[in-house]
Amino acid sequence: MGSGATARAGTGAFATAGPAPDLPAAPLPTFRHPRAGREVLLSGHRVAYEFRRSRRRSIGFVVGADGLTVSAPRWVGQAEVEAALREKSRWILRKLQEQAERARRMEQSRIDWRDGTTVPFLGEPLIVVIDPRVAGAHLNADAQALPGVPRMTLHVGLANGAGAVQLREAVQGWLQRQAMAVFQERCAEFSARLGVRVRRLTLSSASTRWGSASADGSIRLNWRLIHFGLPVIDYVVVHEMAHLREMNHSQAFWEVVRSVMPDYETARVELRDRLLPVMD
């Protein structure tokens, strides 16, 4: 039978048996904000969004980790809000899908705190080993490198069967101490080259900032930079130290950065795009 032929019902073994039964429709993809109060259908996707009344003069949309938030003036009706949502549907769905993908990647990066887990350290995987024979934590970076096998292990002095919280706190404390040591070394390396003096260096645990600098010579650096390789750490160190000469982000500031890191853009992109492991 050719591809353009039409099959006819008959009494043979291949005769049709009547209309196929209805199959349940596949569920529509849904994006739901945890504080959703309204819902709209956008190009086949159900979007449950948080709605706020505000003093702004126009309808505004924000897509964050929780989902879509819509703000509108008090005088704007529901029909007008939904019309604006449909007009911006392509942008909204793209951003929601990006956030969903980011959440998926973050879940994959969540650390399972147990013997043998891995944590990124200075840009490389670090195997965590519970070892009651050691005191504190001991880094072994001299293992024979094999293809696909991390070369570094961290032996943590805890009892066999130690709980996840105990192990996480021990490893996090060790990482923070390593971060301070590395930051001090890198600040010393670049202070002479930049002609600045760091008077005080402290660690930060900020969720949205990698570092900060004050005119008095104080610098704060996020300890979680220790997950990255030295080029990224150096970029943040240089960035904050450059602020001790230029307290702005002017062209002059970026020239200071470029004077000691000509290829800083590469590290800047990695810092922006790479997801940190989820520690809790």
Image (tube, rainbow, N blue to C red):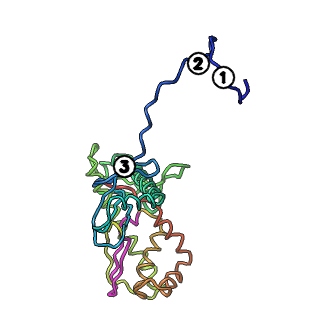
CA separation in Å, label 1 and label 3: 67 Å
- Report the front residue among 38 and 101: 38
How crowded pointer 3 is (Cα within 10 Å; few <14, some 14-19, many 20+) is rated as many
Residue 16 - label: 2
Q: Quadrant of residue 59?
A: bottom left
**Label 1 residue SS:** loop
Query: In the image, what residue type sits under mark 1?
Result: Ala
- Residue at position x 49%, y 65% from top? 270
222 drawn magenta: yes
Residue 43 - label: none
**Label 2 residue SS:** loop
What segment is highlighted magenta in the picture?
A: 209-226
Q: In this view, does 199 lie above or below 24?
A: below
Residues at circles 1 and 2 in contact by the CB criterion of under 8 Å: yes
Residues at circles 1 and 3 in contact by the CB criterion of under 8 Å: no
Q: Is residue 79 above or below residue 162?
A: below
How crowded pointer 2 is (Cα within 10 Å; few <14, some 14-19, many 20+) is rated as few
Q: Residue furthest right?
A: 2
Residue that badge 1 annotates:
7
Which numbered disc flags the more N-terminal residue, 1 or 2?
A: 1
**Label 3 residue SS:** strand
- Residue at position x 62%, y 17% from top? 9
The spot of residue 179 in percent (x, y) is 37, 67
Residue that badge 3 annotates:
129
The spot of residue 76 in percent (x, y) is 32, 65
Query: In the image, what residue type sits under mark 2?
Result: Thr
